[in-house]
Image: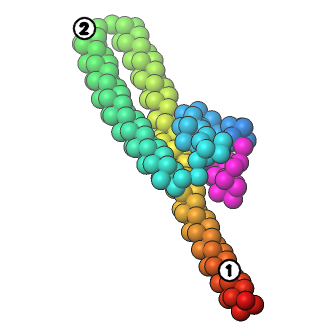
Amino acid sequence: MSGRRQELRACLNRMCASRHAPVAKAATETRGVAWTLSLVAILPTAAGCGGDAGVEFAAADALRAAAAGMQTAVAEYHAEVVAADDRREAELVEALIARSRASRDDEAALAAHAASFGEAMRKLRQDRQVEDARRAAAVEHAEVVEEVAAGLERIAVESLSLRDEVRRYVRAWSQLRRQAQARENRAAEGNR
C-alpha cells in the first residue's frame, strides 16, 4: 500500500473518531484529484453543516460514481495508447524492412538503419513506461476516491448510530419526565 493511501486511511480513521476534524489537516495528508474530491465531499461535514447520514451516503455514492468514471476513462485511454503503440511498433518494423531491402548491399546503411530502429524502439519503450506510470497513478487516485467514499459511508453509519442513541436518550428522558410529572400531579391531588 502506498504512503499516500496509508496517510489517507489514517486521516479517515481520525475523521470517523471525530466528525469535526479540521479540513486543513486533511489537506496536508492527501494530494491531487483524490484530495479535491475528498474536500468537496467532506467539507460540509467538517464545517458543521453536515451530520445528515443521507447527505453522507449521497456523497459516498457520488464519489463511487466519480471513481468508476475515472477507472473507465483510464482503461479506455490505456487501450487507445496500447493500440497506438502497437501501430507505431508495426510501422517501425515495416520501415526497417523497407530500408533494409533498399540498402541490402550497403553495410553502413544497414548499420545506420539498425541503429535508428533501436533508438526508435527505445523511445517507444520509454513512452510505454511513462504511460504505465501515469496509468498506475490514475488508478491509485481512483482507489483513493473509493476509500474516501468508504470512509464517508462509515461516517454516515456512525451518524445513524449516534442519531439512534440520541433518540433513545430523548425518549427515555421524556418518559421519565412524564412519570415525574404524573407523580407530582398525584402528590398535588393527594394534598388537596
Q: Position of residue 163 (x, y in %)?
A: 58, 64
Query: Could one spot residue 2 in this view of the protein?
Result: no
Residue at horizontal 65 percent and vertical 45 percent from the top? 48
Q: In which quarter of the image is the C terminus?
A: bottom right
Q: Where is residue 172 in the image (x, y as percent from the top left)?
A: 63, 77
Q: Position of residue 68 (x, y in %)?
A: 39, 43
Q: Name the residue under label 1.
A: 181
Q: Name the residue under label 2.
A: 102
Tell which of 101 and 117 is nearer to you.
117
Could you tell me how far apart the alpha carbons at marks 1 and 2 are, in whole angstroms?
A: 107 Å
Q: Dot 2: within a 10 Å radius of its alpha carbon, few (fewer than 14), some, or many (20 or more) residues?
A: few
The answer to whether residue 37 is above or below residue 183 is: above
Tell which of 51 and 153 is nearer to you.
51
77 left or right of 173 in image: left
Q: Which mark is residue 31?
A: none
Residue type (three-letter) at the residue carrying disc 2: Ala
Q: What element carries label 1?
A: helix
